[in-house]
């Protein structure tokens, strides 16, 4: 108990002293947390804003190459995160370049790509989140005179991160989360009857979704030994890609992906990061 004479002599009330002690305790708890850095790459403005709005004390900085990052804090259960979010546009090549730059500039403990994807399977509902346990780059292959023979690259998600996703999913109160492969390439698949859609059906039957960035980011992360995770929300299928559909479904789907990515950060422990490398 703080003596009344001390309170009177210093012009303080018991309530004010109690509030100050609570603030100090909170500061000490935050200081005791491990500090870590996460980089989140996105393709679209809406994806960037859906992540950035959850950060504290944000500022925008321009890094080498001209990429602008929104930097802010995010308080996890065991880690005090510094999060850097950038909108880099679509494509695996750009994702690989920007992921490599971000790794060199931020030395992140965890690398994300957060955004939308197309459902490859009809039984995957719109709004479902797909976190890949494996990413395929489906365009690799050999073109002979009689056929095209697939030679895809494949990148697994680190097992420790997969376990973190499973643990987070058990507590999650939001859209369904599938831990299934994603197939990534450079083409927009606009029809389920297209040659590319049939090729994906034939060679990548276990892929739940298709996107245009995950393979590039996973390749860069693999080469630099940085744990990486894609979190994609199903916003369309091969036959319903149009502006009207996007206006109706994209925002809700993206919000779900951003919230789940941050839920993963919230639940992450220092041991998860060490074991994922």
Image: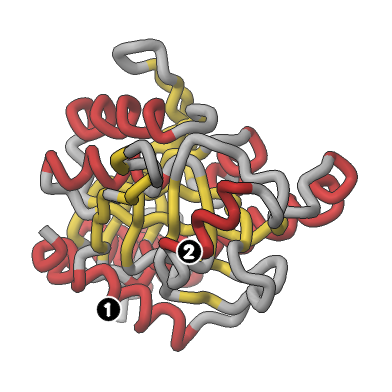
Task: Give the image location of residue 202, x and y in percent.
Answer: 48, 64
Task: Give the image location of residue 3, x and y in percent.
Answer: 31, 75
Is residue 188 or residue 258 the one in the foreground? 188
Gap in Å between the C-alphas at discs 1 and 2?
29 Å
Q: Local crowd at mark 2 within 10 Å, few (<14), some, or many (≥20)?
A: few
Image quadrant where one finds the N terminus:
bottom left
Is residue 11 or residue 275 the one in the foreground? 275
Q: Which residue corresponds to the image point at 43% horizontal and 63% vertical from the top-left?
A: 204
Q: Is residue 6 shown to the viewer in this render?
A: no
Q: Furthest-bottom residue in view?
A: 170
Q: Secondary structure at mark 1?
A: helix
**Pair 1/2: label in front:** 2
- Which residue position is annotated with label 2? 202
Q: Furthest-right residue in view?
A: 244
Image quadrant where one finds the C terminus:
bottom left
Q: Local crowd at mark 1 within 10 Å, few (<14), some, or many (≥20)?
A: few
Q: Which residue corresponds to the image point at 71% horizontal and 67% vertical from the top-left?
A: 126
Q: Compared with residue 145, is residue 135 higher up or lower down, i.e. above or below?
A: below
Disc on res. 163: 1
């Amino acid at each position: 108990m703080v003596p009344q004479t001390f309170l009177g002599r210093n012009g303080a009330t018991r309530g004010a002293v109690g509030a100050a002690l609570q603030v100090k305790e909170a500061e000490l708890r935050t200081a005791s947390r491990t500090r870590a850095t996460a980089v989140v790459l996105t393709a679209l403005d809406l994806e960037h804003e859906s992540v950035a709005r959850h950060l504290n004390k944000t500022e925008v900085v321009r890094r080498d190459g001209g990429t602008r990052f929104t930097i802010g804090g995010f308080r996890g259960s065991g880690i005090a995160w510094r999060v850097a979010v950038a909108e880099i546009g679509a494509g695996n090549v750009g994702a690989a370049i920007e992921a490599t730059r971000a790794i060199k500039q931020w030395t992140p403990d965890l690398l994300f790509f957060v955004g939308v994807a197309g459902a490859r399977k009809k039984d995957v509902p719109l709004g479902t989140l797909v976190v890949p346990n494996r990413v395929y780059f489906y365009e690799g292959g050999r073109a002979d005179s009689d056929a095209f023979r697939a030679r895809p690259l494949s990148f697994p998600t680190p097992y420790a991160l997969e376990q973190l996703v499973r643990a987070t999913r058990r507590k999650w109160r939001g859209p369904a989360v599938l831990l299934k492969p994603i197939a990534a390439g450079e083409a927009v698949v606009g029809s389920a009857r297209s040659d590319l859609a049939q090729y994906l059906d034939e060679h990548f039957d276990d892929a739940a979704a298709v996107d245009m960035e995950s393979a590039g980011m996973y390749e860069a992360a693999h080469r630099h030994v940085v744990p990486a995770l894609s979190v994609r929300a199903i916003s369309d299928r091969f036959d319903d890609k149009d502006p009207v559909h996007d206006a109706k479904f994209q925002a809700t789907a993206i919000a779900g992906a951003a919230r789940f990515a941050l839920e993963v950060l919230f639940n992450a422990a220092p041991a998860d990061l060490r074991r994922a490398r």
